[in-house]
Image: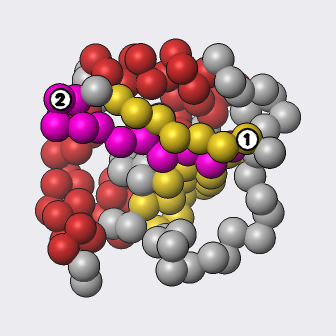
Amino acid sequence: MSKATAYWDGVSRIYEKMFQKFEPYEEVYRFIKENLTSEMNVLEVGTATGLVAREIAGRVKTVVATDISEKMIEQAKNIKYPKNVTFSCANIFKNRRFSDCPDIFMEKHYTKRKNPKVLYAAK
């Protein structure tokens, strides 16, 4: 198990409470939603407990939400989520099993200053 996986497994039980009211997420949601359509298939990398996946699910066709932490994915699956969202434990850099190319690939990252950066690529 990598150090990153061990870390995210360790915070999986408290992650949802830590970030569900996290103000920078609101900025991320606004930015992402401006670029989504109802016909899009989205691959989210680093979903954690699925906060962003659940937020955008109503605007897109499907969301495949992935994380390297099995415990994060377990937490995500235990929270009510829309039917067009699927969760998968995967390291996309090692496991290229996503055969359908998504319309949007998303990865969110926070710097030490907590400024959200969202990287996405559209078809």
* Residue located at (54% from left, 20% from top): 31
Which x, y percent locates residue 113? 17, 29
**Looking at the image, is 8 positioned above or below residue 2?**
above
- The type of residue carrying mark 1 is Ala
112 left or right of 99?
left
* Residue located at (43% from left, 49% from top): 47
Q: How is the image coloured?
A: secondary structure
Which x, y percent locates residue 110? 29, 38
Secondary structure mainly formed by the magenta segment: strand
User: Can you see residue 53?
Assistant: yes
Q: According to the image, label 1 marks what residue? A: 122
Look at the image and say whether residue 113 sits in the magenta stretch. Answer: yes
The quadrant in which the N terminus is found is bottom left
Q: Earlier in the sequence, mark 1 or mark 2?
A: 2
> Which class describes the residues within 10 Å of circle 1: few (<14), some (14-19), or many (20+)?
few
In the image, farthest residue toward the right: 39
> Which class describes the residues within 10 Å of circle 2: few (<14), some (14-19), or many (20+)?
few
In the image, farthest residue toward the bottom: 1
Q: According to the image, label 2 marks what residue? A: 113
Q: Secondary structure at mark 2?
A: loop
Look at the image and say whether residue 37 sits in the magenta stretch. Answer: no
* Residue located at (66% from left, 76% from top): 97
The magenta span reads 104-114
The quadrant in which the C terminus is found is top right
**Looking at the image, is 67 positioned above or below residue 62?**
below
120 left or right of 78?
right
From mark 1 to mark 2, how far is it between C-alphas?
27 Å
